[in-house]
Amino acid sequence: MPGRVLVLMDAGGELGSFVDTLRRAAGAESQVEPVYSAELLMVALSSGLAWDLVLLDCELGDGRSSGWDLLPTLRQRAPDLPVVALAARGSVEAAKRAVAAGASDFLVRSGHLEERLATLLDKVRPYLSLVKRHRKLEEHHRLLLEEAARRYHIVGHSPAMLAVLDLVERVAAVPRPVLVRGERGTGKELVARAIHQASERPGPFVAVNCAAFSEALLESELFGHERGAFTGAERKVLGKFELAGEGTLFLDEIGNMPLSFQQKILRVVEYGTLRRVGGAQEIKVQARIVAATNADLERAMDQGRFQKDLYDRLAFAEIVVPPLRERPVDVAPLARHFLAAFALEVPGVQAHELEPAALEALERQPFPGNVRELKTMVERAAYRTGEPAIRLADLGLQPVVAAPCADLTGSFAQAVEALKRRLVIEALDAEAGNQAAAARRLELSYDQYRYYLRRYGRVASRT
């Protein structure tokens, strides 16, 4: 029998005795909870409790919205949860309509109701068994991912980061390039190292920042050079591709690689061979490539600054690391992790915990610099304070004040326009003039953001 059952009923309707009848049919081992509004129904479903069954009166609903209107929302919120639609009178058309709206079954609540409910519960029992088994498997999978996070030294148990870890484990054994994308400071190299560790490749993990070298130096850094290849080349030097051997070569900031050099990388990815600078021999390389970028590659390709063929080769699998502001549940464990590591690294640090008020304030921060910014903030606070716990005042945060919507003395339309302008300008300032990043921050396309920027008369300092 179902363990927990939710019943949505109109408090002023005729379903007062329905719950009692359901409790008798379900038995003492079932917990039947009535709710009297759609809002309370959604709160119950979000409570963390494992509900087994929902019964919803399609005609009465909650007295404000009919069950017909609530069914699609309920199904979207809990796609695997059995939902039974109720009606005072039955018809083939009503049953079809209920199933089309998302109901798992349809029940007429008149005439021999207790027998009807007993039959219904017998019907849903096999499905409930499958749902419970699925939940156990999901919980086991979640625990495995959390164990993987500890193994790869990735802190964070938010659904978004667990999804990243799931991708890491799935792609690790496939000997193809991976493209890791995300804003600055999100931990893209940590994800790349996790891929390498999970792959169990016999070679080392070798990292190269492609933005740190000119084209000539980057070619020598990656491909190596022969003796006499250029002035000062007094001996043969192996490049990072060869040094990685059968391991992983991490190409960071791939979006900043010169366009003319991208063709050379494309050839290595395509054929697995290269020539050292000044050399004539084709050398076979076996390193697995993991590339990373915070650049808008779609825009770069549209503008001819990044080769589409190279993108296609590198993005055999693509992992997007979510920004910290989208996973505030990870802020507290990350802050504690950074504080503990800093206390071990720096003798004399007094702080070994964070006060609740400090953690709450950190969870409200937007963190444009993401995890890297949080790390710096926690370490700075630990260095400053002489107390055993980091206080809110130690963080040096600017108070987070709700921005006024607009000049409320104007019309509704004027207030909306003022708010749009503020959002567009503040996003640009937060991203240091980077229009593509500002567009992503607002979840707009680049063209949409440019349109609003022109409309509100602001020219970015850099794009």
Image (tube, rainbow, N blue to C red):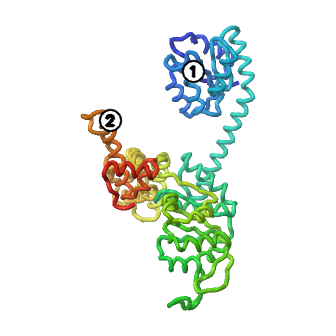
Image location (x, y in percent) of residue 333: 49, 50
What residue is rendered at 37% in x and 51% in y?
427
Mark number, residue 413 = 2
How many neighbours does mark 1 have within 10 angstroms: few (below 14), some (14-19), or many (20 or more)? many
What residue is rendered at 46% in x and 47% in y?
443
| Residue nearest the viewer, comparing 351 with 460 | 460
What residue is rendered at 32% in x and 43% in y?
401
> Which quadrant holds the C terminus?
bottom left
> Which quadrant holds the N terminus?
top right
Mark number, residue 67 = 1
Res 67 quadrant in image = top right
Up the image or down, 32 lies above or below 271; here it is above
Image location (x, y in percent) of residue 286: 68, 72
Res 405 quadrant in image = top left
Q: Nearer the viewer, mark 2 or mark 1?
A: 2
Image location (x, y in percent) of residue 121: 71, 21
Q: Is residue 454 left or right of residue 89?
A: left
Q: Is residue 448 visible?
A: yes
Amino acid found under the numbered disc labelled 1: Gly
Q: Is residue 27 visible?
A: no
| Residue nearest the viewer, comparing 205 with 298 | 298
Amino acid found under the numbered disc labelled 2: Ala
Label whose residue precedes the other's in the sequence (2 or 1): 1
Q: Helix or strand or loop: what does disc 1 sit on?
A: helix
Q: Helix or strand or loop: what does disc 2 sit on?
A: helix
Residue projecting furthest to the left: 409
C-alpha span from label 2 to label 1: 35 Å
